[in-house]
Image (cartoon, grey):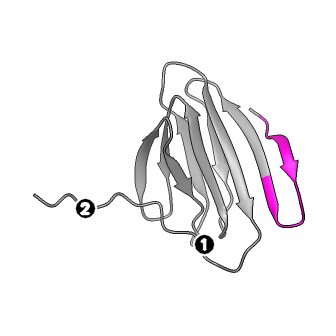
Amino acid sequence: TGLEEVLNTDNFHLGTSQIPVGAAIEMDEGIGRQVIVMKGSVHAQGPSWQKTVRDGGRIYSDPEGPIRITNCADVETELLFMTFDTPISSPKSIQSASHG
């Protein structure tokens, strides 16, 4: 539910959060942030994209707007939040096209 801080330095922030079944949180727009799904499954909805992410999957912040992250599993989902204070932009969290 809330973000529990694990590590906080001048240019790196690490925290964890749990999302109850059916609940949602929002990740602020920007660069340098990512979420790793540690347990469960979530649906991420960005300004112009959406995807479902399972154990080990990542969601990157989007400079174009906030991202709504909804627990779509039947158990509480555990997330790891990382923020890097860096001028390098994050890759977009988009589904890659399937070729075949």
SS for dot 1: loop
Q: Mark 2 points at which residue?
A: 97
98 left or right of 89 in image? left
> Of the residues shown, which amino acid type is indicated by label 2?
Ala
Where is residue 55 drawn, in percent x and y?
49, 35
- Tag in front: 1 or 2: 2
Mark 1, residue position: 63
Image position, residue 9 (x, y; %): 89, 59
Q: In which quarter of the image is the N terminus?
A: top right
Which residues, given as a range, are shown in magenta?
A: 2-13
Q: In which quarter of the image is the C terminus?
A: bottom left
Is residue 8 within the magenta segment? yes
Q: In which quarter of the image is residue 38?
A: top right
Residue located 69% across and 30% down the image: 18
Q: 8 or 27, which is in the foreground?
A: 8
For this rendering, which residue is in front, 95 or 8?
8
First in residue order: circle 1 vs circle 2: 1
Number of other residues with Cα within 10 Å of mark 2, as a class: few under 14, some 14 to 19, many 20 or more: few
Q: Tell me: 4 left or right of 79.
A: right
The residue that appears at 70% across and 53% down in the rendered structure is 82
Q: Residue 2 appears in which quarter of the rendering?
A: top right
